[in-house]
């Protein structure tokens, strides 16, 4: 049984209010905001039998609006990068918002992370909805999105459905920054990844090819300390992990991606998804973002595990997954975050 607590809302300086709600099923608990579908806090049991928060967040709406790190938010209309902010379909070219180098990143300057969603409850969680209008950040079509966060035992489920009335790429991901032990660094976290392929990139993060992880600096088939991201040569250009792993999942099944764990707290998080790719990001450029208790966050203070379609896939149809959503079709993303305690 999930218990719901409506928390005091925040005034949005742009107008209106940001709603806040806490869910608790007795094992794990989560606080969700109507701004950006943000997960502000996520409490799970540690090896001391206590619950602790395992995601980074902010104290207030002003700090969320001041940062561009997408702390805890839904990234969209298209998560990750679209090269040159341009795409084409059936002879029609679209110019999107360019907000990172030459790319449209996570939907543009005013992506879904900065939108006000409608917030309601379900039997075991919350349901947020959003209507992104034609031309929003340059994207075609009216896009309707339904986002469910559900608590089931020691699992957080993230399920997203979307439709559009004009052909448009839709790619949504949950962008929480996980820190499983409350420390100032992720270097003692352990990462293990099942995926055996990843995308090589150019100097602005656009895919060039699919490569095997075996024997490379992206090989995380065995449990590996996150500290290697400042030691492995192939990760120097991005200041750490910021790479998309390619899942072998042609039927879009809910499939295990890998596990993040902390030997200090004993908390592990195993991620399952039906998406064709998962971006692993080591919070490489978090320096100076203001977090909770007005503390400035540090580079490499957390780990993002972002299930998604493959970056720039609207322009690279040979990549796995179906980037363009057509009228009458339904975009479906489901991911499961399973928490456990060891030691």
Image (tube, grey):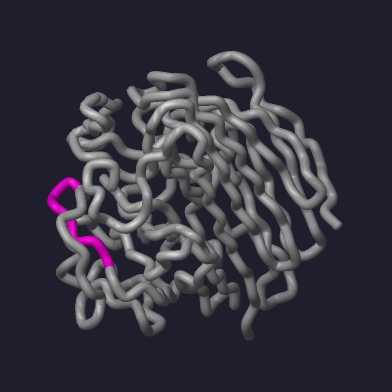
State left or right for residue 315 relative to residue 68. Answer: left
x then y, percent, for residue 57: 55, 45
Q: Nearer the viewer, residue 106 or 301?
A: 106
**Measured from the top left, where is residue 35 in percent x and y?**
58, 31
Q: Is 199 within the magenta? A: yes
Identify the residue shown where x is 52% and y is 74%. Answer: 262
Report whether residue 302 is seen.
Answer: no
The structure residue drawn at horizontal position 65% and vertical position 59%, both measured from the top left corner, is: 156
For residue 146, say whether it is visible. yes
Q: At 80% across and 58% down in the image, what residue appears?
A: 25
Quadrant of the rendered image containing residue 210: bottom left
Residue 335 found in image quarter: bottom right
314 or 7: nearer the viewer: 314
Task: Name which residue lies at 23% across and 74% down.
Answer: 212
Residue 313 screen position, x and y as percent: 28, 47
The image shows residue 238, relative to residue 17, as above or below, that is below
* Numbered range of the magenta stretch: 198-204
**Front residue of this view, candidates 286 and 155:** 155
Q: Is residue 81 above or below residue 342?
A: above
Residue projecting furthest to the top: 15
Say above or below: 121 vs 29: above
């Amino acid at each position: 049984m999930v218990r719901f607590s409506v928390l005091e809302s925040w005034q949005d300086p742009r107008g209106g209010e940001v709603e806040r709600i806490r869910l608790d099923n007795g094992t794990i608990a989560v606080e969700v905001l109507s701004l950006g579908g943000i997960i502000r806090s996520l409490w799970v049991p540690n090896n001391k039998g206590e619950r602790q928060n395992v995601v980074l967040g902010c104290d207030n709406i002003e700090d969320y609006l001041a940062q561009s790190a997408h702390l805890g938010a839904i990234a969209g209309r298209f998560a990750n990068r679209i090269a040159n902010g341009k795409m084409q379909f059936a002879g029609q070219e679209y110019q999107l918002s360019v907000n990172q180098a030459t790319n449209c990143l996570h939907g543009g300057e005013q992506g879904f992370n900065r939108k006000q969603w409608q917030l309601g409850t379900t039997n075991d969680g919350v349901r947020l909805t959003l209507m992104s209008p034609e031309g929003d950040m340059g994207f075609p079509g009216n896009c309707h999105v339904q986002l469910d966060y559900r608590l089931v035992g020691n699992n957080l489920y993230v399920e997203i459905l979307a439709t559009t009335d004009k052909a448009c790429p839709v790619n949504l991901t949950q962008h929480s920054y996980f820190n499983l032990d409350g420390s100032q660094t992720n270097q003692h976290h352990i990462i293990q990844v099942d995926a055996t392929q990843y995308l090589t990139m150019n100097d602005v993060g656009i895919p060039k090819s699919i490569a095997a992880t075996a024997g490379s600096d992206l090989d995380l088939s065995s449990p590996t300390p996150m500290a290697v991201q400042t030691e492995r040569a192939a990760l120097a250009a991005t200041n750490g992990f910021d790479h998309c792993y390619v899942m072998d999942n042609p039927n879009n099944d809910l499939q295990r991606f890998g596990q993040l764990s902390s030997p200090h707290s004993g908390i592990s998080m195993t991620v399952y998804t039906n998406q064709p790719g998962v971006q692993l990001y080591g919070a490489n450029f978090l320096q100076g973002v203001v977090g909770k208790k007005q503390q400035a966050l540090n580079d490499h203070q957390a780990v993002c595990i972002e299930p998604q379609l493959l970056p720039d896939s609207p322009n690279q149809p040979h990549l796995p997954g179906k980037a363009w959503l057509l009228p009458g079709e339904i975009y479906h993303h489901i991911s499961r975050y399973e928490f456990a305690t060891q030691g």
